[in-house]
Amino acid sequence: MQVAIVGIPLGFGASKIGSELGPMAIRRADIRGKRLIDHIRDLGYEVTDYGDIEIENPDYVASENENPKYLNEMVESCSRIVNSLKPILQEGSFPVILGGDHSIAIGTFSALASHARQRNEEIGLIWFDAHADINTPETSPSGNIHGMPLAVLLGMGEQKLTDICGFAPKLNHKFLAHIGGRDFDSGERETIHRLGLRQQFFTMSDIDRCGMAYCVEKAVEIASQASGGFAVTFDIDIIDPRFAPGSGTLVRGGITYREAHLALEIIAEMGGMRSFEIVEVNPTLDRENITVEVAGELILSALGKTIL
């Protein structure tokens, strides 16, 4: 299989700067003496690094009452993401996407959904995150778009974002599974229950009660119902800050280092994944490159690396 590494240095969807440096840091990280691309080759893949997608960065500071913030720049950047990823998908490569804040999922999944649509297929989604990311401008307390991407993909929120690629929703809610949530806004909780998604959100309480393996296997069952397979997007803040301190929206009580690897090992073993992205790695907030190196290691688990 051909693996395509793609960096998306977009950080203005978040409240703190620094996640735009994530792609470069993950690429350059020393992971047990080697770079990420070399480790991927050691797993038997052919790898091409397509570099970073050019982002339309804002040249101003958004006002406090702007909601959503930097909308036009986000629409243009997501359009560029779609245009860059589509040829990679058409050639049959497996994208490994390095973020960037989680707003990039609007562009990345739109590209995947559009590609599947051309093949008369739908694609599922497994979303690893401490947060729901299902706010709309009406429910968002901040106006930051990195808290809205899942809502956008489900067809809710700002029309300029939902209409990227010319159709909405991008994601059929029946094929969504969310893992690791522990910090939801009140409006997000209402949306989840209104859409009947509670059984598709595997919160930290569910993981505590049932175990990570059970929750991930159920998530794969849900997302695999889509005819075109499923994508995985992994926000590093799902991991407890003790193990991954380099992110801008840390919440205590997350999964452990080993639970993160177990989750991705199970997904790789079960099959059906069509792309993998990791987001919200902020090197400016990291300690001794711990989080950057963890991100690289998790990519390898997603690609099938095991202990034996």
Image (cartoon, rainbow, N blue to C red):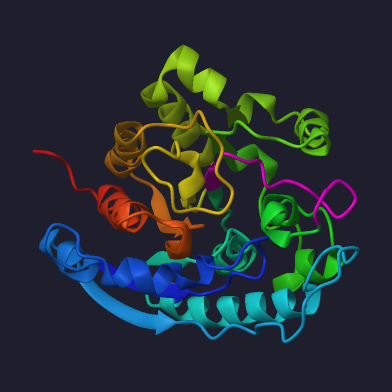
Majority secondary structure in the magenta region: loop
Please tell me which residue lies in front, 101 or 304.
Answer: 101
Q: Quadrant of residue 50?
A: bottom left
**Side of 259 where 132 appears, left or right:** right
**Does the segment drawn in magenta span residue 139?**
yes
The magenta region covers 125-142
Residue 125, placed above or below residue 43: above
- Of the 4 image quadrants, the one containing the N terminus is bottom left
Residue 92: in sight, yes or no?
no
Q: Is residue 4 left or right of residue 47?
A: right
Residue drawn at x 68%, y 60% is 15
Q: Residue at x 80, y 54 (%)?
A: 142
**234 or 15, which lies in front?**
15
Looking at the picture, how far across and down is residue 113, in whole percent?
59, 62
x%, y% of residue 64? 86, 64
Name, please, the residue furthest toward the top. Answer: 209
Q: Is residue 50 left or right of residue 160?
A: left
- Residue nearest the viewer, comparing 235 with 306: 235
Residue at figure coordinates x 23%, y 48% from the top left: 304
- Residue at 20% from the left image edge and 64% from the top image edge: 30
Q: For residue 303: magenta?
A: no
Quarter occupied by residue 288? bottom left
